[in-house]
Image (tube, helix red, strand yellow):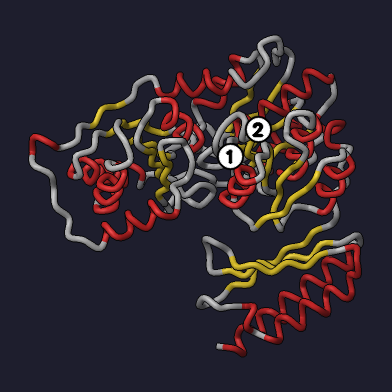
């Protein structure tokens, strides 16, 4: 409630209009929504309640309705018992750092409500879903229809469970919908982009042309081809880059985790490939700073910046489906121009936050692994942004060598951290 109040006070200085609140389907969303609504009202700001909506839908509607800001209540791909709050500014982008700092400063103050006559009013936006559905469909060329495509769509029992099937069906596809019966507790449970095996199994059983799995808040996707092979975010990004290479200003943005095969394939199209830190925030910053249009992560979080302001699983899927229809090629054929390098990642759990760069033994272990790989591989260590983990990743040409080096490096990292505490 106090966060809503603090955000309302700060965003009230940034312009006119209401603040939008959307959420995914986890049960705690009801509680968070009511508390944020009360805080915003106490700050004198009007509210528009959107209900369950994908994160990118809230970003779009914030911008298109000229709202002061948007709030998403979601923990994305996490289990139902987690939750979080994300803010968008009036342009549909994540809040600038200076605005976040102002909100934090307000949180340190005592909460005071405006006078009763100035309290904010809350109204439910009844047509929010239809607005977003039409927006998504507008990103497909009007002459392209998905007639004849059989698609398995896994909505992760999450925010896109109602919207995503309608988008694909209204584009002409036959949709076999799974993960579309949320009960507040089953979001991301053995389904969705983080657990694509249910989608894979259903594609094979149904003889579908493609499977699409979204995550709990609908901002990323994982695919499966008609033979049951998983297609990750790097391969999806390659397919979109290949289809749009004349439109994306000469470069693609990936992250430190992007597969070497993606980098090589992108450069093979005479495009530059830029790596940034892991996180859609850093991809977006690079896209804006370098006037680029396309970037994404291995997890399936892809930003088409000339179409929308944040990662959008539905719009990314539409770009791939449109390419399939325009070229007459299957998903398997479209991804064949990229060869993935074997990549292994092991999560090392930590008891407390540590600076891995300050532990000499870790640096020595990394140098040793890099020496074994030579010029044909990479080593990456990075702390998780959401969990008490150090992610240890090794990538190279030889799968058995990669598995061995990653396991040994993870063991050395764990030992070095324990010794340093």
Could you say which quadrant of the image residue 101 lies in? bottom left
* Picture residue at 86% right of the left edge, 45% below the top: 267
Q: Is mark 2 on a helix, strand or loop?
A: helix
Q: Residues within 10 Å of mark 2 (few under 14, many from 20)?
A: many
Counting residues from the start of the chain, the first of labels 1 and 2 encountered is 1
Q: Where is residue 184 in the image (x, y as percent from the top left)?
A: 41, 42
Look at the numbered discs 1 and 2 and tell me whether their residues touch, using CB distance below 8 Å: yes
In this rendering, the answer to whether 319 lies above or below 11 is: above
> How many labels, in total?
2
Which residue lies most toward the top here?
143
Image height of 147 relative to 31, above or below: above
How far is the residue under mark 1 from the one under mark 2? 8 Å
Whether residue 249 is visible, yes or no, is yes
Q: Which mark is residue 316?
A: 2
Identify which residue, 198 or 31, lies in the foreground. Answer: 31
Nearest to the observer: residue 16 or residue 256 = 16
């Amino acid at each position: 409630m106090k966060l809503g109040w603090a955000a309302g006070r700060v965003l009230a200085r940034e312009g006119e209009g209401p603040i939008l609140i959307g959420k995914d389907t986890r049960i705690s969303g009801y509680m968070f929504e009511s508390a944020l609504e009360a805080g915003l009202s106490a700050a004198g700001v009007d509210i528009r309640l959107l209900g369950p909506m994908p994160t990118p839908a809230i970003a779009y509607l914030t911008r298109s309705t000229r709202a002061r800001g948007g709030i998403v209540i979601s923990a994305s791909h996490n289990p139902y018992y987690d939750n979080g709050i994300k803010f968008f500014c009036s342009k549909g982008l994540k809040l600038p750092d200076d605005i976040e700092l102002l909100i934090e400063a307000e949180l340190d103050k005592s909460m005071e409500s405006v006078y009763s006559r100035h309290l904010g009013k809350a109204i439910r936006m009844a047509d929010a879903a239809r607005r977003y559905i039409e927006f998504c469909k507008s990103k497909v060329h009007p002459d392209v229809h998905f007639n004849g495509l059989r698609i398995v769509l896994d909505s992760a029992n999450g925010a896109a469970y109602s919207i995503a099937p309608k988008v694909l069906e209204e584009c002409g596809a036959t949709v076999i919908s799974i993960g579309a019966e949320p009960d507040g507790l089953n979001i991301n449970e053995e389904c969705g982009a983080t657990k694509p095996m249910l989608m894979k199994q259903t594609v094979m059983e149904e003889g579908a042309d493609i499977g699409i799995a979204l995550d709990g808040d609908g901002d990323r996707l994982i695919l499966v081809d008609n033979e049951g092979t998983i297609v990750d975010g790097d391969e999806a990004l390659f397919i979109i880059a290949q289809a749009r290479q004349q439109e994306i200003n000469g470069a693609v943005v990936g992250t430190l985790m992007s597969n070497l095969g993606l980098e090589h394939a992108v450069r093979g199209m005479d495009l530059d490939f830029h790596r940034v830190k892991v996180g859609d925030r850093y991809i977006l910053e690079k896209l804006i700073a370098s006037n680029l249009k396309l970037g994404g992560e291995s997890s399936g979080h892809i930003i088409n910046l000339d179409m929308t302001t944040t990662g959008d699983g539905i719009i990314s899927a539409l770009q791939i489906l449109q390419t399939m229809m325009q070229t007459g090629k299957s998903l398997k054929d479209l991804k064949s121009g990229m060869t993935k390098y074997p990549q292994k990642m092991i999560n090392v759990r930590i008891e407390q936050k540590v600076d891995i760069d300050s532990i000499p033994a870790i640096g020595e272990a990394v140098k040793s692994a890099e020496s074994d790989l030579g010029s044909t591989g990479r080593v990456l260590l990075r702390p998780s942004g959401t969990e008490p983990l150090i992610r240890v990743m090794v990538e190279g040409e030889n799968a058995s060598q990669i598995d061995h080096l990653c396991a040994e490096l993870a063991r050395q990292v764990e030992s070095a951290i324990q010794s340093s505490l």
